[in-house]
């Protein structure tokens, strides 16, 4: 049975779908998966040992000039790749109108969340097989339930596994860090596209000094010019901090895997750290870790509302999570991992 998964973005959403693929591959020995995904994140599905082919699309770029994009060779090539294989089923794991429209381009029945479960209920009209999944559960578990109900196997009761080809990352890590010592490295994932998810820059600087005093070196990745400038300011607070060069997703994964721990705001790289089973302290303000938090072993969630002093405070403000609180949690996570 050949199945096309449609889950184009974001990075966290794509990563959250990986455990469902692991479940299905373990339950159904003859199943084969391909994956339609935004080109920015096209590396990620290919890291799963049960995904055979990744088909990239550039929806974010194409929608800026839709008519011109439809005439370009890039769109025609994506359409051709969608039609190279004959699929038995399409699973739209996103539940959006755009993902439903992409699913309709394939001549196979489509399964997806029903109107009560889909993020955009209108999308469910495109599905021949609408699936009822409770909304109030973690995104990983929603995907696992969707795949299990669609493909007809019981959803395993144990925690989901991401199924990444970890030996490939460990080989790359050994090659990259062959002559370097990074035994006490901590990565700061400080950047996110939403301003309300940013932790105060002065807090990052204080945490940098505190962890450096505890014997750790700090590494700071970035993706945009503004993020590089922030990373540079944070690193300027202590000589043990290093601003990384701009890295590919695979290189970032290797960097995370080599870390003792990660401190992350609510963003895609935090979910990647979770998928790699790196001890990660994640900071949450307006979002709920129960629904979309970093999922897996050694994941530690700090929620702003738990540290607000009065109920009249802005409960979602990350300023409630002080550097001292985060430092204690990071040191505790490192000790627990070492035990």
Image: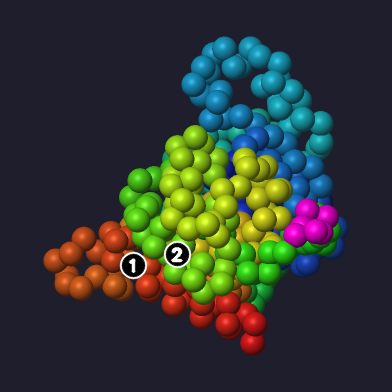
Secondary structure of residue under mark 2: helix
Residue 149 in percent (x, y) is at: 62, 62
- Quadrant of the frame with the C terminus: bottom right
Residue 63 in percent (x, y) is at: 51, 24
Tell me if 181 is positioned left or right of 213 in this view: right
- Residue stretch rendered in magenta on the structure: 175-180
Q: How is the image coloured?
A: rainbow
Q: Is residue 64 magenta?
A: no
Residue 308 appears anywhere in the view: yes
Disc 1 residue crowd, few under 14, some 14–19, many 20+, Cα 10 Å: many
> Residue sitting at 24 percent across and 70 percent down?
308
Please tell me how many numbered marks the rendered image carries: 2
Q: Earlier in the sequence, mark 2 or mark 1?
A: 2
Which of the two residues, 124 or 21, is positioned nearer the viewer here?
Answer: 21
Which of the two residues, 181 or 140, is positioned nearer the viewer here?
Answer: 181
Residue 208 in percent (x, y) is at: 46, 62
Identify the residue under disc 1: 321
Disc 2 residue crowd, few under 14, some 14–19, many 20+, Cα 10 Å: many
> Residue sitting at 67 percent across and 22 percent down?
75
Give the numbered dot on residue 209.
Answer: 2
Which of the two residues, 316 or 223, is positioned nearer the viewer here?
Answer: 223
> Residue sitting at 55 percent across and 60 percent down?
240
Tell me if 29 is positioned left or right of 264 in this view: right
Q: Are marks 2 and 1 in contact (CB under 8 Å)?
A: no
As drawn, which residue projects farthest toward the left?
312
User: How far is the residue under mark 2 from the one under mark 1?
Assistant: 17 Å
Tell me if 125 is positioned left or right of 78 in this view: left
- Comparing labels 2 and 1, the label whose residue is closer to the camera: 2
> Residue sitting at 48 percent across and 58 percent down?
238
């Amino acid at each position: 049975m050949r199945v096309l998964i449609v889950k184009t973005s974001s990075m966290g959403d794509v990563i959250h779908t990986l455990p469902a693929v692991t479940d299905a591959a373990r339950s159904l020995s003859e199943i084969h998966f391909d994956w339609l995904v935004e080109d920015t994140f096209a590396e990620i599905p290919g890291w799963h040992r049960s995904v055979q082919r990744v088909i990239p699309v550039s929806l974010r770029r194409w929608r800026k000039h839709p008519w011109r994009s439809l005439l370009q060779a890039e769109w025609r090539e994506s359409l051709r790749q969608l039609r190279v294989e004959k699929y038995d089923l399409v699973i739209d794991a996103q539940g959006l109108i755009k993902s439903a429209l992409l699913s309709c381009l394939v001549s196979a029945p489509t399964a997806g969340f029903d109107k009560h479960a889909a993020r955009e209920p209108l999308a469910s009209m495109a599905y021949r097989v609408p699936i009822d999944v409770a909304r109030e559960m973690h995104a990983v578990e929603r995907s696992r339930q969707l795949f299990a109900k669609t493909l007809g196997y019981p959803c395993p009761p144990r925690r989901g596994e991401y199924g990444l080809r970890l030996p490939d990352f460990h080989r790359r890590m050994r090659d990259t860090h062959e002559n370097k010592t990074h035994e006490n490295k901590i990565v700061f994932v400080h950047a996110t596209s939403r301003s309300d998810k940013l932790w105060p820059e002065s807090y990052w600087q204080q945490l940098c000094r505190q962890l450096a005093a505890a014997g750790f070196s700090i590494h700071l990745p970035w993706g945009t010019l503004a993020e590089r400038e922030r990373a540079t300011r944070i690193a300027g607070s202590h000589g043990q901090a290093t601003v990384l060069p701009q890295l590919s997703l695979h290189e970032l994964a290797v960097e995370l895997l080599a870390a003792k721990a990660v401190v992350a705001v609510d963003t895609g790289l935090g979910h990647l750290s979770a998928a790699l089973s790196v001890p990660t302290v994640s900071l949450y303000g307006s979002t709920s870790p129960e629904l979309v938090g970093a999922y897996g072993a050694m994941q530690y969630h700090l929620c702003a509302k738990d540290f607000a002093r009065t109920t009249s405070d802005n409960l979602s403000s990350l300023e409630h999570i002080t550097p001292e609180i985060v430092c204690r949690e990071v040191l505790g996570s490192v000790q627990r991992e070492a035990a």
